[in-house]
Image (cartoon, rainbow, N blue to C red):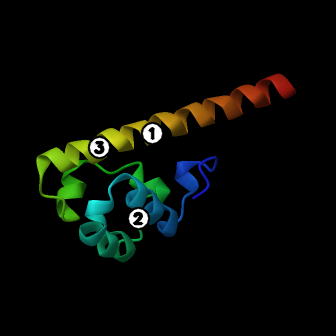
Amino acid sequence: MDLSKRVSLWSVEEVLEWLQDQHPTLMGTLQKAIIKHAISGRVLLRLKDHHLELLGVESEELQQDILQDLLLLRVQEEITELNNLCSECFSS
């Protein structure tokens, strides 16, 4: 997985790689659902607790762990976007 690539541009396969790295114990639960629902990086960034429950993550503790990791991805995405905006402003 290319960590320099924006999360919003991740493919379903890259989402699965991220899941394998971050939550390998949930691969069995989530892999089929991610593929079935075509959860790309853009969709991943929008997941909430009720989505995780619908995808098969019933434990509130696991949901919170995933949501915390998703929050970090959202922050990373925002920082990348701000950096891109700033570089565009100063390069013109």
Q: How far apart are marks 3 and 1 (CA)?
A: 10 Å
Q: Which amino acid does label 3 sit on?
A: Leu
Label 1 sits on residue: 74
Name the residue: 42% across, 56% down: 21
Horizontal arrangement in the rendering, residue 78 relative to residue 66 (left or right): right
Work out whether mark 2 precedes mark 3 in sequence or the reverse, and give the earlier one: 2
Label 3: how many residues lie within 10 Å, few (<14), some (14-19) or many (20+)?
some
Horizontal arrangement in the rendering, residue 18 relative to residue 48 (left or right): right
**Residue 52 in the image, given as x and y percentages of width and height:** 23, 56
**Residue 34 in the image, given as x and y percentages of width and height:** 36, 69
The label on residue 67 is 3
Callout 2: SS: loop
Label 1: how many residues lie within 10 Å, few (<14), some (14-19) or many (20+)?
some
Name the residue: 26% across, 61% down: 25
Callout 3: SS: helix
Q: Distance between the residues labelled 2 and 3?
A: 15 Å
Quarter occupied by the C terminus: top right
Horizontal arrangement in the rendering, residue 66 relative to residue 73 (left or right): left
Work out whether mark 3 precedes mark 1 in sequence or the reverse, and give the earlier one: 3
Q: Which amino acid does label 1 sit on?
A: Arg
Examine the image and state in which quarter residue 15 appears: bottom left
Name the residue: 38% across, 74% down: 35
Label 2 sits on residue: 39
For the residues carrying marks 2 and 3, which lies nearer the camera in this image?
Answer: 3
Quarter occupied by the N terminus: bottom right
**Residue 74 in the image, given as x and y percentages of width and height:** 45, 39
Q: Which amino acid does label 2 sit on?
A: Ile
Q: Distance between the residues labelled 1 and 2?
A: 15 Å
